[in-house]
Amino acid sequence: MKTWVIEFREQDKATFERIKSGSKTIEARALGGPKSTKSYYDDIVVSDRINFLCEGRKILKEVSAVRKYQNLEDYLNKEDLENILGKGATKHSAKETLLGFPGYKERLTEFGIVAFEIK
């Protein structure tokens, strides 16, 4: 079992709070990138733990499922977008959000995306 770290930016504090409250049970990240960076999520497996950080606060959650998708469309069609992105999330808004993160467009196209179910 390994413990990973996922940090939320200050502007994403609401997402951190949803994880803390238990209303958000799925976190998604683009795959790929150098293994030496903290944005490498390819090796996360069931029973690993994720330490979520935001503004000096921490939440430790266990990974209960891992689903990898080769492309963004499969992910958008199969995952619960409201759980991941909040009430009212649509395929269009999810795509805009994900493609807005630095480097995500390239990583999503080349490597795909992973969804972690957490408890």
Image (cartoon, rainbow, N blue to C red):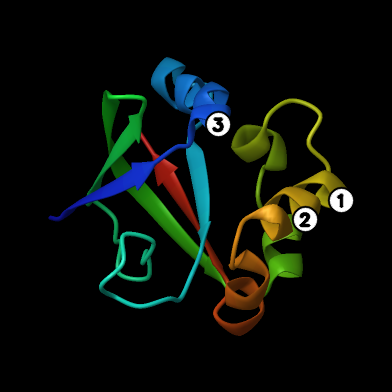
The kind of secondary structure element at disc 3 is helix
Disc 2 from disc 3: Cα separation? 17 Å
Q: Is residue 10 above or below residue 17?
A: below
Residue 70 visible: no
Q: Tell me which amino acid carries mark 3.
A: Asp
Dividing the picture into quarters, in which one does residue 6 lie? top left
3 vs 1, front mark: 3
Q: Nearer the viewer, residue 88 or 39?
A: 39
- Tell me the residue at 56%/22% (across/down): 14
Q: Tell me which amino acid carries mark 2.
A: Lys
Question: Of the numbered discs in the image, which one, if any, rests on residue 95?
Answer: 2
Residue linked to disc 1: 92
Q: Tell me which amino acid carries mark 1.
A: His
- Callout 1–callout 2 Cβ contact below 8 Å: yes
- Tell me the residue at 76%/58% (across/down): 77
Whichever of labels 2 and 3 marks the residue nearer the N terminus, that label is 3
Disc 1 from disc 2: Cα separation? 5 Å
- Tell me the residue at 77%/55% (across/down): 95
Looking at the rendered structure, the number of numbered marks drawn on it comes to: 3
Question: Of the numbered discs in the image, which one, if any, rests on residue 12?
Answer: 3
